[in-house]
Amino acid sequence: MTYIAGQTISSALWLTGMAANPIGAGIAAQFGVNMSFGNWVFVASVPCIIALIAIPFILYKLFPPGNKFTPEAPEIARKGLLEMGPMGKQEWIMAGTFFGMILLWAFSPVLNLNLAIVAFLGLAILILANVYTVEDIRQGGGDALETYIWFAILYMMSTALNDMGFMKTLGAQLATYISGYSWVTVYILLTVLYIVIHYLFVSQTAHLLALYAVFLQVAVNAGVPAALMAFMLAFATNLFAAITPQASSSNVLFVGSGFLPSKDIYKQGAIVTVLNIVIFLLATPWIMWASSL
């Protein structure tokens, strides 16, 4: 869980830390908010550093590990490497395939390549080279494969909600309910609601595309400084990744590992999300000042 928590914070620290971040920056620009690589890091630095220090410590205290001292670990690792021996043909094929996939993903905008097609191409190469078999997929997928199937279903459901106009209606209703409140109250309410509502989504990018502009417009109309709200919502898009097993596609890896059951992600992820919200809201004076420079 500490890794998942760290991932939510580190992705919020960088403009390039998560796929939805540059999209959010593009939407924010329509509201006159500049989110460059440099000022993003500057604005995010203080709350992210505090969160990276505080949250692992709190998780350690709340959920202490069974083994706190493992002095034998380095020796076990050395013996394991000796038993494995040097890299064989299949390992080199695996490494080369992944390196090629990373290159294709990195240059996909230039080459106009679909990211999913690159992934399936890599899988096809591994199967043809007998590095990975269909039986491996069937037997080794387990909970991870099942979660990915549900991920696709839930993604289509959340997309359908947006296509049906549910999100626009939600924004209109929000504007009605928050009228009359101070901008500080509106800012806090919208931030918390934006995060909590991710229980209905399985994609951070889909969430941002559906709600970011709506929430930002409602906030600006209520008097919230545009830069403050734009940065906070962009950070929140990263912070809610720990809230459910399907909140981020990377969570599937942890569910599939068997070391972190779904129920633990719901419980511990909720704690991590609350801690993130509190830390970033308390850092509002810094975010407001830094984003205004």
Image: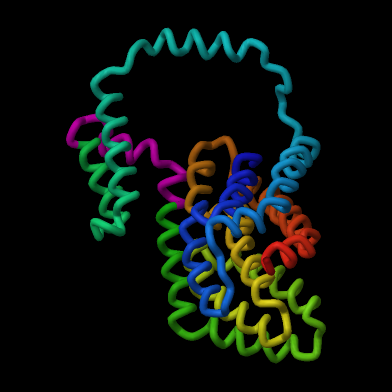
Q: Position of residue 219 (x, y in %)?
A: 68, 81
Residue 121 in magenta stretch: no
Viewed as shown, does residue 200 lie left or right of 183? Answer: left
> Which residue sits at x=22%, y=42%?
124
Q: Is residue 135 above or below residue 5?
A: above
Viewed as shown, does residue 234 lie left or right of 140? Answer: right
Specify how the rendered protein is coloured. Answer: rainbow
> Which residue sits at x=53%, y=83%?
166
Q: Position of residue 268 (x, y in %)?
A: 69, 47
> Which residue is situated farthest in the front direction here?
293
Q: Please, what is the dominant secondary structure of the magenta stretch?
A: helix
Segment colored magenta: 128-147
Residue 141 in magenta stretch: yes
Quadrant hosting residue 116: bottom left
Q: Nearer the viewer, residue 272 or 191?
A: 191
Quadrant hosting residue 73: top right
Q: Nearer the viewer, residue 149 or 89?
A: 89
Q: Is residue 77 above or below residue 65?
A: above
Which quarter of the figure is the N terminus placed in? top right
> Which residue sits at x=64%, y=46%?
5
Q: Is residue 65 above or below residue 9?
A: above
Q: Position of residue 96 (x, y in %)?
A: 27, 32
Q: Is residue 120 above or below residue 201?
A: above
Q: Position of residue 151 (x, y in %)?
A: 45, 58
Which quarter of the figure is the C terminus placed in? bottom right
Q: Nearer the viewer, residue 47 or 152?
A: 47
> Which residue sits at x=74%, y=65%?
289
